[in-house]
Every structure is written in C-alpha cells, then in structure tokens.
Image: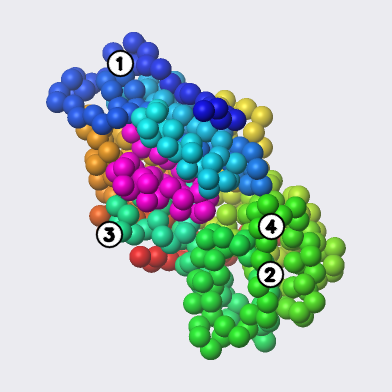
Amino acid sequence: MSTKRRTFIGGASAAALLSGSTSAFAQKKYDDGATDKEIKIGHCGPYSGPASAYGVIGKAIQGYFKMVNDQGGINGRQINLITLDDGYNPAKCVEVIRQLVEQDKVLCTFNVLGTPSNTAIQKYMNTKKVPQLYVATGASKWGKPKDFPWTMGYQPDYHTEGAIYAKHILANVKDAKIGILMQNDDFGKDYVDGFKEGLGKDNAKLIVKIATYEVTDPTVESQIIQLKDTGANVFFNVATPKFAAQAIRKAGDLNWKPAQYMTNVSASVASVMKPAGFDNSQGVLTAYYQKDPTDKKWDNDPDMKTWRAWMDKYCAGGNQGDANYIYGYGVSFLMHETLKRCGDDLTRANVMKQAASFQKFKIPVLLPGITISTSATDFYPIQSVQLARFKDDTWDLFGDIMAAESA
C-alpha cells in the first residue's frame, strides 16, 4: 500500500545507547514497537485535503522528536516516528492506522487529528488495546476511560468550550439572536451541543439559524449570507481553519457586524485571522489555553525563547505566527514525558498508566496557571481556558482562568 507521506525519524545510535543508565539493563518489559534501541510511535494527520492547515502540527511533531533523538533519545532509546497523510478523511485514517498497528507495529499512536477520523478508529484501537494518545480533537468522547480505556484526549473539550461561549453571550449581549456556522460532523455537533446546554433549555430559542457545511464544500459564503439575512447579532463560528477564515472574511465583505465567537481550534493568527483580514477579525472572541506566538507579552518569556530557538533549528522556515506549531510542540512535550516515565516498562498498559498519572504537570507553552492533570478516571488532561479577544494583530487575553471540569 502506498501513502502520500511516510516519514521516519529515528534509528538508534551507539552513543545514545551507551548514554543510558545502568537501570536500563534491569528487567525490561516490551510490547510491539519497543526494544532496547528504539520506541516506535505512529501518527497521521492532514498533510493534504480540506484541513491541511493543520499539517504543520505533524511537522512540529517531527521536529520535536528529531530534537529528542539529537539529545540522546528517551532513556537511551531513539524515537522512530512514522507519520502518514490521511487527508482528513476517516476512511483513509482507518487504512493508515491499520498499517501503523498491524504492519509497522507501533507501540502507540499519538495525536491523530480530527474528530471524524478518531471516531472512525476508536473502537479498533480499543479492541486491539493500542494506546490512542493525546488525540488532536477536543470532543468530549475522548475522556471516557470506562468505555474506551485506550483513548485519551489532550486539549479542552469542545462541549465545555461551547458552554463557556454561551454563558458569555447571555451575560454580555442584550436580546441575543444567534446564528451558527457548523461543520456537519461530530466536531461541529459536539460544540453546538455544549453551546445549547450553556444557553439552557429556555434560551435555546435564541438560536435563529444553524447553517451547516461539509468539509468537501469549496466555500461557506452562501451560509454566511443566510446567517446575515436572519438578522442575527451574534455569530458562533464552528469551523476548521480554512472555513473559519472564509466566514470572517465574508461577514466583513457583507458589512455584517455581529458579536463573533470562534472555536479555539481555529485561533491561529497565521492560518485564520490574517487570511480573514485583520480589519474583519477585530473583536472576535475565543478561548485560549496556550501562549500565542504573536502576543508580544511573551517576547521575553524564557519558555517562548526556547520555543523560538527550537523553531529556528527544527522547523526552519515554519511560520512562527502559526499557533499550530505551539500546539504540536506542547503535545509532543507531554508525549515525551509520558514515555520517559515508562522507564524500561514499555508495555502498552504501562504507557496508558503513565498517561493517566499526571498531577499539575507544567508544559512550557501553556498559559500560566494551566497544567496537565489526569487519573484512572479522568482522561481530560487540560481542563482550563482563558477568554481572548482579537485586537489589532493578535489575541488579547482577559478575565480569569476558567476551570472546565469536563469530566
């Protein structure tokens, strides 16, 4: 079987192995994908297709583990990262994941992107008992260890984020009439379900129209015209980057000026706000949990300086205004620590055990006050956000850190 993209990072070096501690030669436990010399991780994402703006996350992951290998690997083992292109197509995702598990025999998969794609592989991964770790989607279904003990999320869940926007609208917009643009899949539905819950039963009538689109659609311009024509004074933009940018730009072209709320998955200045036009983007609200590289308040932040130096070396040419590189770096930092804590017990069961054992763990690119906590009954690593408003050419944080308490 051929794939559009197949990247290997790894291959053990003698120096890396010799640098291991003597404990590395104690009793070792391995499942597929782990040896004395390497740890094999599987990843796939949209390097092509309608969500290809997220392809840079895969590039960031490759760059991160290239750095890890240059530094001697993890407990003396090199990381062999195999990353494939699934084009944001659930059927293609099933195909490449089966290849990663059954042919490449990876220890685990990591940060597969997209709610539809992860939904398509979730039962398979859990039947095979292969960790489906830190998925790149905030759907609430990734935090259900009783039903799916081999699947864990990473970012704040969409359901809670949607509820936060709804409550902000109720508190701040008089006589709200809400129009929603929704991607017609589990990603969009999860956000809208949480949003409706946040509005409350008696307030669901505030929604005057939900306009849907398919990821295969060329544009969402007709949907934005429909929403404007309803007289809506609030616009909830539930879209992936390409369509989120189109929606903001079209609203500007129509001189439609509602209060705008946009999901954090499309909050990248480089891939969404700039293409939408900064003039059109003023005042858009979103929820943030990581440092934005365009926010000057982080210019002298030591962790962001480290990130920029890493970008220069391992993602040379990458747009440092694109928050997707921050995301890829942060989630890779967590995966790195998870594998490090496994020591010489590189079984799939121990990988999940370590992933479910974090307490207020700090990732350098998350906002101050936001940490990673998990347990055997809590598979939501990040449960806090802070609201931000787009101003000039960056996001302006305001208010307090809000705990989502997703579980």
Label 1 crowd (10 A; few <14 / some 14-19 / many >=20): many
For label 3, the residue is 146
Confirm or deny contact between disc 2 and disc 1 (CB under 8 A): no
Confirm or deny contact between disc 1 and disc 3 (CB under 8 A): no
Give whichever of discs 1 and 3 has the lower sequence position: 1
Give whichever of discs 4 and 2 has the lower sequence position: 2
Q: Is residue 281 left or right of residue 346?
A: right
How many angstroms separate mark 4 from mark 2 (CA)?
A: 13 Å
Q: Position of residue 117 (x, y in %)?
A: 50, 49
141 in the magenta segment: no
How many angstroms separate mark 3 from mark 2 (CA)?
A: 35 Å
Q: Quadrant of residue 224?
A: bottom right
Q: Is residue 34 above or below residue 207?
A: above
- Kind of residue at disc 3: Lys
Residue 27 seen: yes
- Kind of residue at disc 2: Ala
For label 2, the residue is 211
- Kind of residue at disc 4: Ala
- Kind of residue at disc 1: Leu
Q: Is residue 195 above or below residue 5?
A: below
Q: Nearer the viewer, mark 1 or mark 4?
A: 4
Q: Nearer the viewer, mark 2 or mark 1?
A: 2
| Colour pattern of the rendering | rainbow
Q: Which mark is residue 101?
A: none
For label 4, the residue is 244
Magenta span: 106-135
* Residue depicted at x 66% and y 58%: 214
- In this view, the residue farthest toward the bottom is 202
User: Which type of secondary structure does the marked residue at label 4 adopt?
Assistant: helix
Q: Which mark is residue 17?
A: 1
Q: Position of residue 78 (x, y in %)?
A: 37, 22
